[in-house]
Image (cartoon, rainbow, N blue to C red):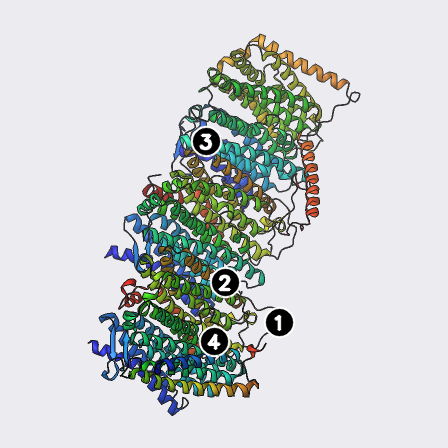
Amino acid sequence: MAAGGALSLPLAFLLPLLTALVVFLLGARRAPWLPGIGALATVAAVADAVRHVAAHGPQAYHLGGWMPPLGVELYADGLAALMLAMTAAVGLAVTAYAGPYLHDGHHHQEAERFWPLWLVQWAALNGTFLAADLFNLYIMLELVTLTAVPLVAITGDRASLGAAMRYLLLALLASLAYLLGVALLYGGTGTLHLRQVGELVGAGGPAAVAAALITAGLLLKGAIFPLHTWLVPAHSNAPAPASAVLSALVVQAGVYLVLRLWLWTFPALLSPAVGWLLGGLGAASVLYGSLQALRQSRLKPVIAYSTVAQLGYPLLLLPLAAVPAAAAQAWQGAAYYIVAHGLAKAGAFLAAGNIRYSLGHDRLAGLRGIAPELSVSVLALGLAFVSLMGLPPTAGFLAKWQLLSGALGGGQWPWAAVIVLGGLLAAGYGLRVLAMALAAAPSDEPVRRPPQRLPRRMVAVPLLLALAVYLLGVSAVPALRLLEQGAPEALG
Amino acid sequence: MTQAGLYTLAASALAGIGVYGLIVRRHLLRRILALNLLGNAVFLLLVALARRHPGYVDPVPHAMVLTGIVVAVSATALALVLARRYYAETGLRHLPEDEG
Amino acid sequence: MMAAAYGLLPLAALLTAVATAAIVFALGDARRRQRTFWNLFGAGTKLALVLLMAHGVLQGHTLEVAWPALPGATLRLVADPLALLFAVLSSLLWLITTVYAIAYLEGSGQRARFFGFFSLCVAATFGVALAGNPFTFFCFYELLTLATYPLVVHRGHSAALAAGRTYLGYTLGGGAALLAGTAALYVAVGEQPFTPGGMPAVAEWADRAPVAATAVLALLLGGVAVKAALFPLQGWLPAAMVAPAPVSALLHAVAVVKAGAFGVVRIIEDTYGYALAAELHVTPVLSALAAVTIVYGSVRALAQAELKRRLAFSTVSQVSFITLGVAAGSQLALIGGLAHLVHQGLMKITLFFCAGNYAETLGEHRIDALNGAGRRMPVTSAAFTVAALGMMGAPPLAGFISKWYLGIGALAQGQGWVIGVLVASTLLNAAYFLPILRRLWLLPATRDWPARAGRAEAHRGLLDPVLLTATAVLLAGLLAATPLSPLGWAARIVEQGYPGL
Amino acid sequence: MSVPEPLLLLPILAPLVAAALLGGRARRLGAGLLAVAPLTGLLALAPGAQALELPWLLLGTRLAPDTLARALLALTAPVAAAACLAAAGGYAGPRRSGLLAALAATVAALMGLLLAADLATLYFAYSAMTLAAYPLVVHARTPEAFRAGRIYLTMALLAEAAVLAAVLLIAAEAGNVALAEAPAAVAGHDRRGLLVGLILVGFAVKAGVVPLHAWLALAHPVAPVPASALLSALLVKAALVGWWRLLPLGEAALPGLGAALVVAGLLSSLYAGLVGVTQRRPKTVLAYSTVSQMGLMTVLTGLALLQPAAAPAAGAALAVFAVHHGLAKGALFLGCGLHGRRRGWYLLPPALALAGAPGTSGVLAKAGLKEVSASVAEAALGPLLFILSALTTLLLARFLALAWRGDGGLDPLPQRLAVLALVALGLVLPWGVGLRLAPAAVAYALQPGVLADALLPVIAGAAVAAGAFALRGRVGMPRVPEGDWIKPALLAGVRLGRAARRGWRAARRASGLSAPRSGSLRRSPGPPPGA
């Protein structure tokens, strides 16, 4: 029953939207259970969609039965399904975590604002993954941005406001660059549909300019070096749940789109030079982000910079995509990287949120000797970091292995070197944090006030996310089989 | 000089002004305005595209422009709110990192 | 049915350790008695399962579990005799070390964390032992690094943290090399199981691309050489001495260095095959490095005033005998090396337990403070004496057996210089162990130590493990000729697995 | 009567059991048991006990006494028993049970060494004996004792390294070979020269061949009486066991090494005699006489190495010589432990025997030596042997002069019993062994002519001694430190080390490096303070 499966695509988009509307109208105070219901419903819809994609291949759905170009098509292939699933997992976790975090009496107005914003954003993210034409992508991206910015600013202090302002300006600029590119493409091909554009677009000048504009916009939204400047203040000043979704989902959507467009829409333009340029940017953000993370003195900036670093890895696929010997493995690696990073990063930010929540700060130096009180959160943080380091037995490792094998198989040693080096640097900053957490409290300093008691759910959620990364680390085969649905021949 | 060509020319002029303003100006309001200019330039370009085939108007770009304007308006609104909150919070009219 | 049950044993044993870790973490610091129970229960169960596996292997069952982790990379646990040699050693010493650690850490903080990672560490060691292909080996090898780090920094003071940094700097660097090497190997020849005598595909590949093959072999060996503390990559080992005694025992005798040495065996014998490795001119370098390490470690040990540091450098020296045995390339030498894998473990763990006892009961860390300790702690000191003499290679103790086989094996390959190394190491060992024995037994006590509490010289939990391992050292030597002794088992491994040598 | 094989383990286990008892409640019982434990060694002489196979032990152990072993067991059992008896019943100093335990361990190791019939077990027993003897040497715990112990252990371990290398070289070709085949294996070894060299050097330290004798001269005076009796009478013989088990005697002729060994033996005999005369402590004198006598036994070994045909005769002669010397030396050393005013009378018979006075076992021993040497090197050795026996007489005269009068303390019965037993045995046992192994030598030794020219060197030596006694006080005796060369050498070493360290420090300071890290001991190349 493919139709039912197809039907679950619009549901995956509409359910969170609907929930957001109701929550907005009722007010989160009056219906604290509502977001949970909505999240569960969304997860169910996504699960159904994933099941159908896995069973019957790519699914398409035309809203209201209108055909393109004017109608809106929702399209889910393996990659999209994987993203939907990852988003659903993170979304569920964040929803579960945000409840106690926001409704503890300290965060009223944040609670009021958070739920609608986050639920709309979830819808927009699903839309981004499902959108089948360039303009809908634009709408969804804008929607994501316009919900992400307030999430950054939600606490309303000067640091977060400044970060949000900068984020907004740059994001709007990026969207306009994207839109301009789309306009040029439409002018050239007369269509907006991802695959049709891909078939019609030539290697000519205007197409190249359009691709450049679009890519630039997406790289900025994906916070790829050197367009990452806005990310760190924004992500490290937001409240924990917001940081989690921003780092795990929002920026990754940008990277996802870079891959999507270059592999589906502009493969004709993907010359080795372009591949090396984009891969080089990816490598640069891997190294730069890691090195910066090593120099931070607070926990959340460390995690934020590690986001910059992790976002670079998937781009390493682009130089390899053209090499037959390497493409398939590199592609699996890149896709799995996004999934692994999403889960691990959400877990890390939520765990960091716990630490900050109970200590009232996240200075690394102040973490000495906290392990006993916050052992579970620290454990979750550590487990998540292990995946970011790409060490077994985590999903991060499997992704890294595939990407590395691809790089070696393609005979492109530099990328392999970058991958290995990036792992070591990640180990460097990760263990800098953990060492502080494992360290004994300095004997000379007076006993600190016992940290604030953590609600049980807030303790459990990050740990579960981290453990999920290990579950995916035991075997990537199911996920990668799903990924094959509707993948371009070059990558099959 | 066809009408489309004219539109395109105007669009690029607007875009130039927008980018210039966005880069050179530090005052938040001016930047927001610059962004709007840039957006309008893109819309103008789309409108021009609608007429690239003589004798028939392509509806799709118009649909895009309409939607785009809605998005732009909401984005501008958000930007303005943020700018005001920021000013209220800090007394600054521009982002601190941009000084000097 | 029966065979299927046997097939699942490896997984069961692995999960036992993991589950123990999980339970211990979950119990938290407060519930001491339950934790103790679960620790011992887990260790005991694992040992039982491993012995059952040994029985199964003797029966001729194939014990194997495998599931795909990636297209083209499977996680595979296989219990061959070589794997069991290491697995039995680690599980047995895990049980003993657990008993010791429970007594040793009596009343210190953070015990849940400690024992949790302790179990995890042994699970990883078990995985390293049973890894059926390079991918699996790498996974558990890295897991081991991670699981041991919290143990190294357990004390949490800045010295411990610094040591932890050094430790990770070395081991993760080695891990990176191993990763690159393993991935390159997979790209070159795809997934191959460990095959005694070497993987055929690797041999073909080496014919096609000898340079690449050599480079990859160098990467792989470089990766494991770090944990095997092969000169010049031995720096982390003495630094890691800040850890509590049970951890040092674990690092030096059971888990980390052994994983490295075991990796050398797997890579040389089961991945490339000795013939190919020799053809690529790698084994001469390896044996030269091993020889240098043996002498270097002993010479450095001479100059150490702190007992544990001296023992650490002695480990650096002793572990390289295993490498030497592998690199010598004769059956006898390999037998000696593999037997030494067990022998060194038994002797070194005894020595570290004793060092721990002196530190715990008398509060002495320096060697020159141990004058007359033999009278105050006769049992501990007797055990220490046995183990030290064993390290010297004095018959009839375990170390003598290893040296005997290494020596005649090397001579069989016409490598007479190895005898020189063995003799030199014997003399150096005597030079740094005998003075300690003299202080323990012959010199009058210079300190006034706290009087004994009760009749035992120290906590039972600290004494029984020492006695057990010391007896094992003695028996491993005395009963070497019996088939189930470490030597006998090593001989079985080599005769079954490496008739080609 | 015939004994079942497992009883061959008894000589090794009995002393250990006794030692184990010493620790616990049954201390007295243990001491008593220890005094008789060595006598179990005589079981090996019984006809039944041929060989005991213990394939599960070590690398497959085999115990089987051959002719040489039986002869030496006949010596070891009584001497060890006497020493243990003297210690158990007579020793009143500190750490008594420590001394007894060390004695027991040494005896067990000795028995093992004699019974061992395979390579690994031989090496095991030999190194065990080396280590077990260390506590005997340092028993006094004085700086002097520790210095002697350090020198003993250093030299012994260095030598053992050579032995280990030799053992491994043999095992590499023949595996854990049965000692009966060992000489053949060595003879056929493709590194024979190196191998034989290693064996000679390795055991030469125990044999006290000059210049490797220094430890003997230092260890004997400081060790308690029963210990030095054990060392001097039995321990040094272990070297002979090692040589005769491993060297290719009777299998191959190695003229070069053989001649070298003979010369070394003669030289060390001569040198030790001369140095010994200058010594002032009776036990030191005895130690040097041991070195001198061992030199003669070394000569016998060398002759066998020189000429395979002579090996059997040399073996027999050696066995007789060893028994004779062992009994006499044991008696003399134990005698030094007596305090009675008339202890000289106890000491006289063994002294005469060593000097080779007519009718004593000394004549028999020398006869064997003469016979063999005559068969190998015509007349070359005759005069030398004459000088040497004269020197021996002189040496023992010196000893008697120093040790004649005890300080008049009263001696416990067991001690006197032990000495008397050994003295008595010394009169008969060598002849018994001689009749069993070398009847020709016995017959030869009993000829009146031989008695006469056996008398000459004794008279010569006695005359010189008398002269010296008459001139005593007027001509000064040159002062030679105990262990002659070792002390100056060590001092030089220490000075060298100090100088080197000073230079090194200066260099560091010059290059601006910091002082050595505080983890590491500063060690001087020479012996640490106390030397």
Q: Is residue C35 left or right of residue C133?
A: right
Residue at the left extreme? Answer: A1
Residue A445's disc number: 1
| Amino acid type of the residue that numbered disc 4 sits on in the rendered structure | His
Q: Residue D27: x and y, percent?
A: 55, 43
Q: Secondary structure at mark 2?
A: helix
The picture quadrant where one finds residue D346 is top right
| Residue at 56% across, 20% down | D260
Q: Chain of mark 2?
A: A
The chain identifier of the residue carrying mark 4 reads A
> Does label 2 lie on the same chain as label 4?
yes
Whether label 4 touches label 2, CB < 8 Å: no
Q: Residue furthest front?
A: B1
Q: Nearer the viewer, residue C166 or A281?
A: A281
- Chain hosting mark 3: D
Whether D437 is drawn above or below D531: the answer is: above
Please tell me which residue lies in front, B43 or A459. Answer: B43
Residue D169: mark: 3
| Few, some or many residues within 10 Å of mark 1 (<14, 14–19, 20+) | few
Q: Is residue C34 visible?
A: no
Mark 1 vs mark 4, foreground winner is: 4
- Please state, as top left, top right, bottom left or bottom right, where the C terminus of chain C lies in the image: top left
The answer to whether C122 is drawn above or below residue D30 in the figure is below
